[in-house]
Image (cartoon, rainbow, N blue to C red):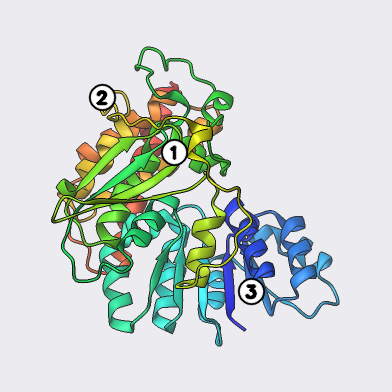
């Protein structure tokens, strides 16, 4: 029986991963969540894992009460995530937490020698060089869970040794495709959370609305597939049927298609290299009728431009724009800044941050800390 642990078990990716695990007889040894105590407790009572972690330390007493008598070990905070990442007898760890909190547990699991199913963008955005180097040294496999990176990974299978010319990274365009900056003045949180194709968590949905999500995926793709910025083309594909494509040296393009459902990439990452039955709708191209492809608007969506600039410069810049974005999105969701201020803050931090080399995880965390401080300062100034 294959064994796994899940960081972010109560989120959209985590809950779907549990469905995949149940269907395909994967033993879940540990679960972790940020703050949803009741959902985490319900999952734990059903699965009886060895350990659970609630990241919010103030929620521990409530979780202990709900799991009283089960014998399940309970931990909290970053130390709790690291304890799960270090567990013995685990084949693969799914990291689907949101934000920079995912970096250290990923490195911890790699050090342990556990393979990673990666749905946490920030791990590679902020610490890509460290993570890829550590995984190579330990012989750890990183299986991408994002639909776009999974598509690229799938298109590469069977083509080892053939030269990759580049990739086409598709984007839905989010709820504001075709809008100008003047159109986006006064956008509400509710409007920004209304994604046309995907059901995701609040932070990721806002990232999709600003196209920050695609910028983060651009950076991820560089590390996962050893690419240069000029080898990645972003294409807006509103139907989210073509999940991404690869171009080989002979100019042949191979794409992966499917209905917009995250169960396919989740299952592929967890069961690789097997392809087995999956509970998703069959793709009918005739139902769609036509598929469209357009260029992204780099002028309107500052976050996308900031990410590409940051990774082109390199060093600490990707970690800085990521940290700035996390703070800006939180401020927008709290009603402290306007929608367009997210991009302004991210671009400002990108432009004002001096480049420094990343030599260790502390360098990443320091870049993140400084960027968050500057983002909070900018958000406060915008409010006033």
| Mark 3 / mark 1, whichever is N-terminal | 3
Q: Quadrant of the N terminus?
A: bottom right
Secondary structure state at the residue bearing disc 1: helix
- Residue 24 image-quadrant placement: bottom right
Cα distance between the residues tagged 3 and 1 = 29 Å
Q: Is residue 117 left or right of residue 323?
A: right
- Residue 360 image-quadrant placement: bottom left
- Residue 222 image-quadrant placement: bottom left
Q: Is residue 350 left or right of residue 365?
A: left
- Which residue occupies the foreground of this view, 123 or 161? 161
Cα distance between the residues tagged 3 and 2 = 44 Å
On the image, the x and y values in percent for residue 223 come to: 27, 60
Which residue is found at the position 50% from the left and 35% from the top? 286
Q: Residue furthest right?
A: 69
Which numbered marker is on residue 30? 3
Secondary structure state at the residue bearing disc 2: loop
Secondary structure state at the residue bearing disc 3: strand
How crowded pointer 2 is (Cα within 10 Å; few <14, some 14-19, many 20+) is rated as few
| Mark 2 / mark 1, whichever is N-terminal | 1
Q: Which residue is mark 1?
A: 207
Q: Quadrant of the C terminus?
A: top left
Q: Which residue is mark 2?
A: 299
Which residue is found at the position 60% from the left and 62% from the top? 17
Q: Are marks 2 and 1 in contact (CB under 8 Å)?
A: no
Q: Are marks 3 and 2 in contact (CB under 8 Å)?
A: no
- Which residue occupies the foreground of this view, 7 or 81? 7
Vertical order, 213 against 184 (above or below): below
Residue 349 visible somewhere in the drawing: no
Cα distance between the residues tagged 2 and 1 = 16 Å
How crowded pointer 1 is (Cα within 10 Å; few <14, some 14-19, many 20+) is rated as many
Which residue is found at the position 25% from the left and 24% from the top? 299
């Amino acid at each position: 029986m294959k064994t796994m642990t899940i960081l972010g078990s109560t989120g959209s990716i985590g809950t779907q991963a549990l469905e995949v695990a149940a269907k395909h007889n994967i033993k879940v040894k540990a679960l972790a969540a940020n703050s949803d105590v009741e959902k985490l407790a319900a999952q734990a009572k059903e699965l009886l894992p060895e350990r659970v972690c609630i990241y919010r330390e103030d929620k521990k007493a409530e979780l202990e009460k709900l799991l009283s008598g089960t014998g399940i070990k309970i931990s909290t905070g970053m130390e709790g995530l690291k304890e799960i990442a270090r567990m013995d007898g685990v084949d693969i760890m799914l990291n689907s937490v949101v934000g920079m909190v995912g970096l250290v547990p990923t490195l911890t699991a790699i050090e342990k020698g556990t393979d990673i199913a990666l749905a946490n963008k920030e791990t590679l955005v902020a610490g890509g060089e460290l993570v890829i180097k550590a995984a190579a040294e330990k012989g750890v496999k990183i299986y991408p869970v994002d639909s776009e990176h999974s598509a690229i990974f799938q298109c590469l299978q069977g083509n080892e040794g053939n030269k990759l010319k580049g990739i086409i990274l598709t984007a839905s365009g989010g709820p504001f495709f075709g809008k100008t900056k003047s159109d986006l003045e006064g956008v509400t949180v509710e409007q920004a959370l209304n994604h046309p194709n995907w059901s995701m968590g609040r932070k990721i949905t806002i990232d999709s609305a600003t196209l920050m999500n695609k910028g983060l995926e651009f950076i991820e793709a560089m590390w996962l597939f050893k690419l240069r910025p000029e080898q990645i083309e972003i294409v807006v594909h509103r139907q989210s049927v073509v999940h991404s494509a690869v171009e080989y040296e002979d100019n042949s393009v191979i794409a992966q298609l499917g209905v917009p459902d995250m169960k396919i990439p989740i299952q592929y990452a967890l069961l690789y290299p097997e392809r087995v039955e999956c509970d998703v709708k069959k793709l009918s191209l005739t139902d769609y009728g036509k598929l469209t492809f357009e260029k992204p608007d780099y002028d309107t969506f500052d976050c996308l431009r900031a990410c590409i600039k940051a990774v082109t410069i390199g060093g600490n810049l990707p970690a800085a724009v990521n940290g700035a974005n996390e703070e800006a999105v939180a401020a927008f969701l709290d009603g402290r800044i306007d929608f367009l201020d997210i991009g302004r803050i991210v671009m400002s931090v990108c432009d004002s941050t001096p480049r420094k080399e990343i030599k260790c995880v502390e360098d990443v965390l320091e870049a993140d800390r400084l960027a968050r401080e500057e983002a909070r300062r900018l958000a406060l100034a915008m409010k006033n």
